Amino acid sequence: MDARTPPHERLRIEPGPVARRIERFIEGTVRGHFGFDKVVLGLSGGVDSATVAVLAVRALGPANVIALRLPYRDLAAADVQRAERLVDALGLTSETVDITPIVDAYAQGRAGMDWHRRGNVQARVRMLVQFDLMKAYHALPIGTGNKSERLLGYFTEHGDDAPQVEPLGDLFKTQVWPLAEHLGVPREVIEAAPSAGLEPDQTDEGDFGMPYATIDLVLVHMEGGFDDAAIRDLGVPQEAIDAVRARVLATHRKRLPTLTPQLQDVPADPTRYLSGALR
């Protein structure tokens, strides 16, 4: 089975209507809710960020989408080249900021700074740049994460999860691929092995030990209330079910909102009284 084809009817989408809903969401949220005209996003060269870029262009126009290329050393060089070609094809305003000096300045002299920690630093520095340029361009940062990554906890806290707007946040990875194809995202982007690009020779599916097709099949059925026996009947081995469940449970903390004790006799949102003045 092609890993880019949703393996089950529960994962199949109608890309046209989905694209239109996300475009309306982007325009309504960015302009209506937050009061911005522009967005800024990191364009990695992967399918998720490319799909968000195309949707944002369709929703807001190319002049209102600022694409950032934020390379670290020579990691993911092919991804950066794909991002450059996409910027040209979409006619986006773009900037390239080499984050190598920032990351290496922090990492220098820190014993035990392995690639996992260094990768998290890269992700957080990229958000530092993105939120700084929010002020320079008066553009709202938007995210490029998908539902599979979020459920698996496959993101850096205060990095990939920082933007308040996540257009693909309710789409599993195997649903992003047909949406990208519908939108005309280049084949070289769709067919590239998914990778966070945070360490040498890293791929998402290599980290998981199984393809997204299997992961999403398990996730969508767990979400639907199916038991393990029903998922095994779909051809998924129990060890894969156990591995997916273990990742979701182990990363639950990363999906919790900020927790604050309520000490005052006021609503949880202490500015609710301003609701008439807020967008």
Image: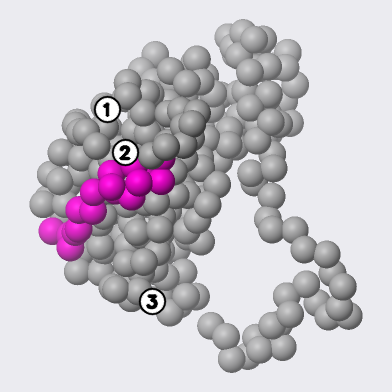
* Disc on the earlier residue, 1 or 3: 3
Which residue lies at the image location 47% right of the left edge and 21% below the top edge?
A: 207
Instruction: From the viewer's perspective, tell me whether residue 96 is left or right of residue 269.
Output: left
Residue 144 visible, this angle: no
Q: The residue tagged with tag 2: helix, strand or loop?
A: helix
Q: Is 43 above or below relative to 240?
A: below
Amino acid type assigned to the residue bearing label 2 in the image: Val
Which residue, given by chain and number where applicable, does mark 2 sit on? Answer: 47
Which residue lies at the image location 72% right of the left edge and 88% below the top edge?
A: 273
Amino acid type assigned to the residue bearing label 1 in the image: Ala
**CA neighbours of label 3 inside 10 A, class few (<14), some (14 to 19), many (20+):** some
Q: Which residues are magenta?
A: 91-107
* Disc on the earlier residue, 2 or 1: 2
Q: The residue tagged with tag 3: helix, strand or loop?
A: loop
Which residue, given by chain and number where applicable, does mark 1 sit on? Answer: 192
Give the x, y percent position of residue 212. 47, 24
- Furthest-front residue in this view: 109
Give the x, y percent position of residue 21. 43, 57
